[in-house]
Image (spheres, rainbow, N blue to C red):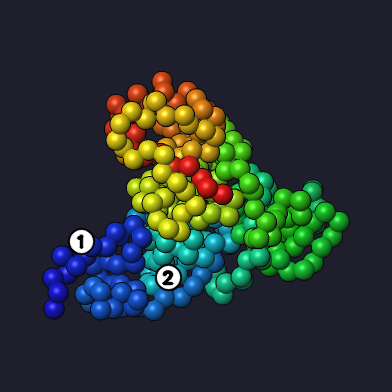
């Protein structure tokens, strides 16, 4: 039998469904575990659902799942499910009251920063909650005036949603909608998010699925699947480079999008919100706290 500790070391637990007592059955033959589970797919039915490190309300928030996103749960106990998110592969615990089964395959996404789900096709009806950019919707086919009904019972403004195949062209323009949004560690929604989620959200709206965390994003940018080209690989003087709108910059643990040749947009703990700052003056502060710029990539779409 393989050494579990050594075998485990090759897997990143943020995106690998393994625990000390359980693993997804897709990992059989790759890692030793006392038990394996095939998992059941659930769908987020609350406006947003925290994915936590431990199964309790005080557990650290690792990330969030948006309305309509799916998660495969491998274990359920005491009101909590443990599993892996379909969108970016993140693993953690989610409150069972925030999900439902079976899954209604989504066909549309929210294209505005946020919008209400209404209980009736009426602006004066009681809202069921706010859902954020990139939340996923399955439509029932019912329409009334400017409202469409989704299969979980809510009504949404038709002008606020778009088919999955309809994408934005400029990730920076998407990110700019989040200006002044509070910084929130592990957040992915329009009411609060962190630096990597801002970049992830902006690219998702443009039809590009990026990983969740900065180190995973940087690694992904170097893969054949990524529509990115390398601008700077950590060697030399990045400040001499002619940067342009859309360039993605990575420090250890931080990321930003260039708004133009001189300014960047990012969710940051300095201002505790999404701001646009001069890159070269702000970069020194980030370097002091996190380290130097390690990579710059340019979208090729």
Residue at 51% from the left image edge and 28% from the top image edge? 261
Instruction: Please name the residue that numbered disc 2 is placed on.
Output: 73
Residue at 57% from the left image edge and 43% from the top image edge? 171
Mark 1, secondary structure of its residue: loop
Separation (CA) of disc 1 from disc 2: 23 Å
The residue nearer to you, when weighing 119 against 241, is 241
Q: Quadrant of the N terminus?
A: bottom left
Q: Quadrant of residue 223?
A: bottom left
Residue at 61% from the left image edge and 70% from the top image edge? 105
Count of numbered circles in the view: 2
Mark 2, secondary structure of its residue: strand
Label pair 1/2, CB-CB below 8 angstroms: no
Residue at 42% from the left image edge and 29% from the top image edge? 241
Q: Does the image show residue 34? A: yes
Vertical comparison of 229 with 265: above or below: below
Give x and y (percent) for residue 2.
14, 74
Give x and y (percent) for residue 51.
43, 56
Mark 1 or 2, nearer chain start: 1
Instruction: Please name the residue that numbered disc 1 is placed on.
Output: 9
The circle drawn on residue 44 is none
Q: Nearer the viewer, mark 1 or mark 2?
A: 1
Give x and y (percent) for residue 34.
23, 77
Give x and y (percent) for residue 80.
41, 64
**Residue reaching furthest right?**
145
């Amino acid at each position: 039998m393989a050494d579990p500790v050594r075998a485990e070391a090759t897997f990143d637990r943020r995106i690998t469904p393994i625990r000390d007592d359980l693993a997804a059955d897709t990992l059989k033959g790759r890692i030793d575990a006392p038990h394996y589970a095939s998992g059941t797919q659930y769908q987020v039915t609350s406006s947003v659902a925290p994915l936590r490190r431990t199964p309790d309300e005080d557990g650290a928030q690792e990330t969030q799942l948006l309305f309509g996103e799916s998660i495969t749960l491998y274990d359920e106990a005491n009101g909590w499910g443990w599993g892996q998110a379909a969108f970016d592969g993140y693993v953690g615990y989610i409150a069972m009251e925030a999900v439902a089964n079976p899954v209604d395959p989504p066909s549309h996404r929210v294209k505005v920063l946020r919008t209400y789900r209404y209980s009736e096709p009426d602006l004066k009806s009681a809202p069921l909650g706010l859902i954020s950019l990139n939340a996923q919707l399955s439509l029932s086919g019912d329409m009334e005036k400017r409202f469409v009904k989704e299969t979980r019972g809510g009504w949404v403004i038709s002008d606020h949603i778009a088919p999955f195949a309809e994408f934005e062209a400029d990730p920076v323009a998407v990110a700019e909608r989040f200006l002044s949004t509070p910084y929130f560690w592990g957040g992915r929604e329009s009411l609060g998010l962190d630096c990597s989620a801002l970049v992830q959200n902006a690219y998702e709206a443009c039809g590009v699925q990026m990983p969740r965390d900065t180190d995973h994003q940087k690694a992904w940018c170097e893969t054949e699947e990524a529509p990115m080209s390398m601008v700077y690989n950590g060697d030399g003087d990045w400040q001499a480079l002619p940067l342009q709108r859309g360039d993605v910059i990575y420090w250890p643990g931080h990321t930003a999008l260039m708004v133009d040749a001189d300014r960047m947009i990012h969710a940051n703990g300095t201002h505790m919100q999404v701001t646009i700052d001069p890159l070269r003056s702000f970069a020194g502060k980030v370097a002091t706290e996190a380290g130097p710029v390690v990579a710059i990539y340019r979208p090729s779409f």
